[in-house]
Image: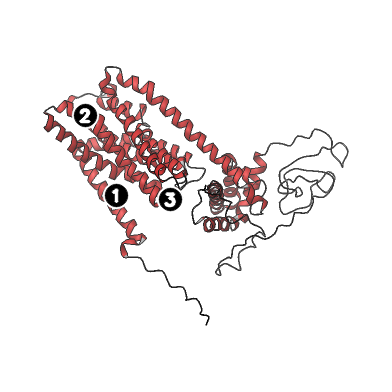
Amino acid sequence: MATCPPYPTNPPRPHWWQRGWVRYGALTTLLAISGLVILALVREQTGTQGFLVGLGLAVLPVPLLMAAFRWLDRVEPGPWRNLVFCFAWGACAAALIAIIANSFATRWIATATADPAGADTLGATVIAPVVEESAKAAAVLLVFLFRRRDFTGIVDGVVTAGVTATGFAFTENILYLGNAFGTDQLTGDSGFASVTAATFFVRVVMSPFAHPLFTVLTGIGFGIAALSTGRHHLRRALLPLAGLLLAMGMHALWNGSAAFGEYGFLAVYGAFMVPCFGLLTWLVIWTRQRELRTVREELAVYVMAGWLAPAEPHTLASMHARRLARQYARRHAGKQAARAVAQYEAYATSLAFLRQRGRKGRAGPDFAVRERELLDALWHRRDVARPALDHAARATAPPPVAPWPGYGTPGSHAGYGYGYGYAAAAYAGYGYAARPGGFAPVAPYGGYGHGHGHPAPAAPAFTPAWVPAPSSAHARSRPAYPSAHPAPHPPLPRRP
């Protein structure tokens, strides 16, 4: 006797400590308590006036560093809450851990060796790098584990680590500059000859990138681990550890440069720190350009399926064109339209990276679901985003150059555009336009340029592969989806 399958049961309700608001509340409370404690400790060591002076001077490099890391993250911008968490962790939790652990370790070494001067040197060159880099790496680890969807490569690791280190350096600069101001108050020094001016020049002018440079090495290790396949578990564990060890070593070299003689600091700064900073800057910019190339290459399959317009992969692969599209939307349709265009660009970039991970065998079990979510988000923003992207494509496209006269009006030239065989309208096709000396009839996706001669050939008929089912709440208001879609999952390499 045949039996019907049982009805699906509801998933068990999570325990109270597993709820999202409980986790967010606990994390916010932890960071707030850490901030209050670190505020009290710094104020106790520097005094009220020293704290205010240190705060005013230490905040100066923060906007520049944050803008630099945000610029690196513009290709696939992560959520602001991740950056806020990283900065707060570095400024509050990591700084508190460093102050307590460094003070305790230095006092213990001084008591054990009866050499306070040697204890200070050992604490600065050995204890401080290990404690501080480990405390900052904890934020990168938390984002890597619990915000895995937002952590997909080297750039994400660099941004996460750099913002965390920026917050840590902000608190540390308050402490150093406040203590320097207190010293000047006792000695009566002022102006450029003061300890405050010297400390400001060394920490804020010469080396605002020092702490971010150290911790970025840890972030690169996590970023490479994020690019590794799931089968290489040992590699995924060792790469972040290797980056952390490099960060500790560079930090120890920087702190110990004062013990290398009169010109030891300048020698380490010029021969080691500046070249490393230039090399890492080149690396992250090269990685950013490679991400833009990935966007252009991976989105082509969605153009063939009808989800994207022919010129959109090239437009989305140019940061200049993206900015033009947002400006056009803001100027003609307001801030909401500009926000929709920015979301369209972000979703398209995430879709390209998702497709690349699937093609390289790094797709997770939620690949098809995530792809549907991104395509659905793109499709329902296309009416707002497409005119802006059209404008950006036309503004950034090189002018067509015709080597010889074309067919049609005497003396005219044939113009070649972009597209996949549709007539010239919003986009240019490879075909010919319909009227001599004029524009071709409007097709689903036309071309940019003018053409002469025959009408464009009809669009090829696709076999429907997948059509997402819109939810019932918006089923009537949503536009029809394309009749074709790439394979729900790209072919993955077989395991040997």
> What residue does disc 1 label?
31
Q: Residue furthest right?
A: 410
> What residue does disc 2 label?
122
Dot 1 amino acid type: Leu
Marks 1 & 3, CB-CB < 8 Å contact: no
Dot 3 amino acid type: Arg
Mark closest to the chain's N terminus, 2 or 3: 2
Dot 2 amino acid type: Leu
Visible residue check, residue 181:
no
Q: Residue furthest bottom?
A: 1
Residue 250, percent across and down?
A: 34, 30
Give me the residue at 52% from left, 82% from top: 1
Q: How is the image coloured?
A: secondary structure
To which quarter of the image does residue 413 belong?
A: top right
**Neighbour class for label 2 at 10 Å: few (<14), some, many (≥20)?**
some
Give the number of the mark in front: 1 or 3.
3
To which quarter of the image does residue 317 belong?
A: top right
Residue 495, percent across and down?
A: 52, 48
> What residue does disc 3 label?
148
